[in-house]
Each structure stands twice: as structure tokens, then as C-alpha cells.
Amino acid sequence: MSHVSDTSKEVILSIRDLKVKFYTEEGEVTVISDVNLDLFKGETVALIGESGSGKSILGHTIIRLLPKNANVSGHIIYKGIDLLKIDSSLLRNIRGREIAWIPQMVGSSLNPTVKIGVQIGEVLIDHYNYRNQRAWSSAIDLLKLFEVEPAEEVAKGYPHQLSGGMKQRVLIASAIAARPNLLIADEPTKGLDTIKKTLIVNIFKKIKDLKPDLSILLITHDLKFARELADRVIVMYCGKVIEINDKNSFFELPLHPYSKLLLKSLPSKGLYPIPGKPANVANPPSGCRFHPRCPYASDICEKSSPPLIKLDLNRCVACWLYKR
């Protein structure tokens, strides 16, 4: 079995046999390989892994925001619709209204020439035909909810007048304005200090209170943030999903050797660095891609890539230790 699928829960997004390649001057590079997973209605999933693991590319692939040199195969099914097969006009109706995206690059994601209130309200005008004044009022309400004060003055201002933390909250407000069914947040705590990270955690909790059936995919390297908010954890390494686990099990008894070392590298666990260098997705190792850094590696790990093995209803792992 290649993925976790709990039949008691409603699947909102189903990814099957997903592969993403980039065509470059140096040749073809496969950045995501054979990803299979389900996201359930109302759950929050943390997608974690080191830089270069492919987690942000997976988020971009879901909403089809990849560069032109990308080639994507497989299926991404949302409400019975394969997002990889629909035309751009239908995709525009879904993106922003039903599936929202919070980008990683805060500084360049807001239009410097458009007022904050207009930028938050434009999704309501585009997708719900709100009149300008109603959209403006909704924008102010969201700024107040997310503690961007004084909301009326901020709405009249421009991005350059805001701090990084305030810009992040404006982006979240823009994403959530249309009350989407699925929210994908790419590194929402990146570059923020501890106090601002706590504020972002509280904002995501408010979002869930506002819309309990909202599904959230948190793409993050911030394990503390993941522990605060996630119901499940998905671990990626060098373009592959190597562990799917419920949050409590992951942080108490992680399955994959990489996951165990990742948790040991936290300051609270002693700050032990993971040995070796992250695998290069352009030239990955043979077999299990983690084997050059793994303390448990054996001959089979070097020769053959382990499948994602289903251990029970909530846990999967790609490691030959579990096949033995």
C-alpha cells in the first residue's frame, strides 16, 4: 500500500503517482518522484523536510504555479477533478476561491502600488462579485481579526509601510478572505522571531475556529510550528515521501531514520547535526536516497529504493528496516 487512506474521513485532495521534472541546460532533473498521499477534510498536515526536499515544489504543483520548464505526470484530484488536466479558466475559478495559497516570499508577494485593503478584498470581487465597499469592509474585518491595527489605516496604506510580520498577516488575510476549502501555506514562519511565530500560530488557530472544516497543508521546516498545529506529519527527503504519521506518534516515536535524526537535531534534543550532506536531487544516490547518511544502512539500502509501507491506518514509512 503506497499511501494512508482512512475510509472514515472525507478525502479533499488525493495525489497519485506524482512526478515532477525540470528541463535544464544540464539535462532533465526529477525533483519529485512517485508521491502518493491523501489530505482529509478539516485536518492540518505539516509537510516537513530539509531545504531541497521538494516540499515547496509539491505545493506549487498542486496549484499549478510551476515554471514553463516543468513537466508533471500523475494525478491531483480535488472534488473529483484532476487539477493537472483542467484548462486554465476552470483552474482560476478553483485557485483563490476553493484552494488558497500563502507564498513564502513575503516581500515580493504583495503589489507595492495597490492599497492593502484592495489587495485583500480583490478575491471577493473576482470570485463572489462583491461591490468595492463590501470587499473593503471585509478586508478591514480580517485585519482586525488578525490583529493588524489600526485596521482602517493599514487598509489605506501600502506594503512598504508594513513590517515583515504584518505583511505575513496581510497575506494570510488575502488567502483566507474567500473562505477556501484548502489552504496551502509555504513556510509561513520563515524569517520571523519567536514572538511573531507565536502570533502566526494563534492566527492559524483563529482560522480553524472561523472554518473548522478547512484543510490546511503547512509546508515548513519549523518543527515546533508543526507540532503546535498539525494533525499529521508528512516527511519528504530528496523528492520522495518517506514517512506519513500522526503528529503525536511522529514526535514521540518517529519511524524513519531520517525523521529520528531530524528530531535529534532540535535544540531541545541536544542539537545533534544530521551527519553528511543532504542528497542532491539532480544526482540522487542509488537505492534509498538517505542511505549515505543513515546509521542503519545495509546492502539492500544501497541497491534498491524501499516502497512506502503501510504499517497501520495512520502510519507509513519507506525504509527497508520495516520490510525485514
Image (spheres, rainbow, N blue to C red):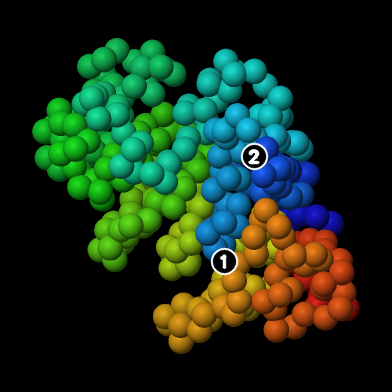
In the foreground, 250 or 22: 22
**Which of the 4 image quarters holds residue 191?**
bottom left
Q: Residue at x 71, y 57 (%)?
A: 283
Task: Name the spot of residue 239 as percent of width and height, x first.
Answer: 67, 54
Figure label count: 2
Closer mark to the observer between disc 1 and disc 2: 2
Q: Mark 1 and 2 residues: CB-CB less than 8 Å, in contact?
A: no
First-in-chain label (1 vs 2): 2
Q: Residue at x 15, y 43 (%)?
A: 149
Mark number displayed over residue 247: 1
On the image, numbered disc 2 is attached to which residue?
25
Circle 1 packing at 10 Å, graded few (<14), some (14-19), many (20+), is many
Dot 1: what SS?
Answer: helix
Q: Residue at x 50, y 84 (%)?
A: 272
Mark number displayed over residue 158: none
Q: Is residue 88 visible?
A: yes
